[in-house]
Amino acid sequence: MRNRSSFGGRHELGQNFLTHRPTIQQIVGIVARTHGAILEIGAGDGALTGPLAGLGRDLVAIDIDEDRVRTLRDRLPQVRVLHADALRHPLDRPVVVGNVPYHVTTPILRRLLSRSVWQHAVLLTQWEVARKRAGVGGGTMMTAQAAPWFDFELHGRVPARHFRPSPSVDGGILTITRRASPLVHSRDRLAYERLVREMFTGTGNGVVALVQRSARLSRSQARAVTSRAGIAHDRLPRDLRPEQWAALWREVNPRLGPGARRTTAR
């Protein structure tokens, strides 16, 4: 027999179902401000699926629990409900929404940020993940690596008591929006990500020392580069805004000549 909680969620699938109606309405309201077909990941018992179907847009809902999928198909025949894994199913719709199972949040986020089709993601994740991705209290390496192409925004905290069964930590509503005009050209993404990784994992006291080591510059060159990028010399990587990361990249990218450093990425 499958390992189910008293609320019907399967422990091995990390199922914690959202039950708080105002939070459900908030998430659906955010989705309503987007445009295009919707993919819901981790549909579960349909707490979000039903209200999303009420938007009258093309909706595909996926879940890894085949029993839940069968039940949801019977209850919402107007929705295409698929038995699928969010770590494998194509993320090929303009809007991706879901209550993300906490134990697969990071791989799902990494997969989202590597795909080029979707435009808006509205996700319910662990509070700490949502807070960090939105840069509250300082940015993270993952967010900094994605920031030239995506905008992250935090929309509030969801107490654990609003889920059944209750998880051990609160949730948070996070939106990710693809930038219409990237701050760094897509052809430079791998090299840019490498620079960010070296900045976050390198040793040094402040951004000047980190730029010096990561970009193989002299101390005076590193100070000049950070100044031109509008970065105070005592800042740390977690303190930098997306525009500052992009400006820093334009300063240290060896492919760009002096006349190209001020151009906007397309």
Image: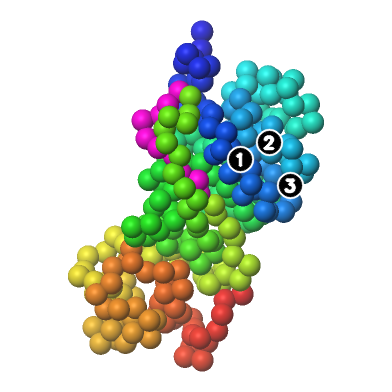
Badge 2 is on which residue?
51
Residue sitting at x 28%, y 84%:
223
> CB of mark 1 within 8 Å of CB of mark 3?
no
Residue sitting at x 67%, y 42%:
39
> Which residue is outermost to the left?
205
Residue sitting at x 54%, y 39%:
23
Magenta region: which residues?
165-174
- Dot 1 or dot 2: first in sequence order is 1
List x then y, in percent, for residue 113. Answer: 54, 53
What colouring method underlies this structural image? Answer: rainbow
Cα–Cα span, label 3 and label 2: 15 Å
List x then y, in percent, for residue 250. Answer: 46, 79
Residue 37's label in the rendered image is 3
Q: Is residue 142 magenta?
A: no
Q: Secondary structure beneath disc 2? A: helix
Q: Secondary structure beneath disc 1? A: helix
Residue 7's label in the rendered image is none
Badge 1 is on which residue?
25
What is the three-letter code of the residue carrying label 2?
Pro
